Amino acid sequence: MAIQQSNPSAVSEQRAETIAQSETARRLIFIAVGWCVLAGFASGFLVGFVNGFLRVQNASLSPPLAFTIQMLLATGILLIAVKRQTAILGHGNRRIGVDDGPITRRWLLCVLTLLATMWAFFASFFWNAALPQSFAAWRNESSWTLAGFAIGAVTLAPLAEELFYRGWLWKGLRQHWRAFPTSLLTGGFWLLAHIERGILLLGMLLPVAVLLGLTRHFCGIRAAIIVHALYNLVGILVLILLRRAAG
């Protein structure tokens, strides 16, 4: 009796299908929550540990410096998450795992970018006026801290957050859901990641979440990273201008 040999390509396809089926929407959400909690807890714990050590020496991190370090640590953890999870979702191809592709509808991207930057300009002035203590902390902070915060906010944060929330998680959920619930959940996760800074900030970021969701759906993940980076850049430029005006 002849022995029937299995086709390697068929086995590979069956394995890929099994992996895809195991990545249910519930599992993806559970994994996303786990990584978000890890990013928030680990970065907060390390900054708190350093602050506790410095208090023994009668010193402490300034709030802007502590926030900058925590942001860099959290975005680093999210980038690790993206590297691991996209390899699984994309069956070894991380670009497929975030649905990376050329920017589409460039005219729409220009419109959405204009709306995002206009909102960033208004929201930044409003934030500094509504919370003068926050602005005062940055006004007295060193230029090195401001430079570190600016670099992280314009490069690492948009890259990590978009690749995680509207890259890997978006790609995974779109295999099960339509665009609207996917945008709703990923945008909600992104908003909750900023909840430690207060409800006021969440309200100000809500229009940004909508704009980023539209950008991701119609223009692609690269476009969402660009819009996010420009939004943060405008906010930092406003902070620098106000800082210089205050002398």
Image (tube, helix red, strand yellow):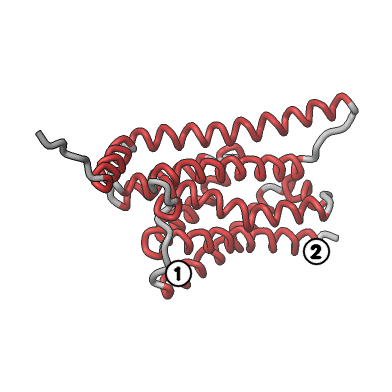
Percent of width and height locating residue 194: 56, 42
Q: What residue type is labelled 1?
A: Leu
In the rendered image, is residue 199 in sight? no
Q: Which residue lies furthest to the top in this view?
A: 56
Q: In which quarter of the image is residue 109?
A: bottom left
- At horizontal 47% and vertical 55% (from top left) the residue drawn is 207
Percent from the top left, x then y, of residue 226?
A: 53, 63
Q: Is the residue marked by circle 2 packed among few (<14), some (14-19), or many (20+) residues within 10 Å?
A: few
Q: How many marks?
A: 2
Point 50% across, 55% down: residue: 208
Where does the image place residue 126, in percent across and percent down from the top left? Answer: 63, 56
| Of 3 and 75, the residue lying toward us | 3
Label 1 Cα neighbours within 10 Å, binned few <14 / some 14-19 / many ≥20: many
Residue at (72% x, 29% y) in the render = 48
At x 74%, y 50%, the residue is: 135
Earlier-in-chain disc, 1 versus 2: 1
Measure the alpha-carbon separation of dots 1 and 2: 33 Å
Dot 1 falls on a residue whose secondary structure is helix
- Looking at the picture, which amino acid does disc 2 mark? Ala
Q: Which of marks 1 and 2 is in front?
A: 1
Q: Dot 2 lies on which element?
A: helix
Left or right: 235 as drawn, with respect to 14: right
| x and y, in percent, of residue 121 in the image | 61, 63
- Residue that label 1 marks: 109
- In the picture of the structure, the residue carrying the numbered disc 2 is 245
- 217 above or below 134? below
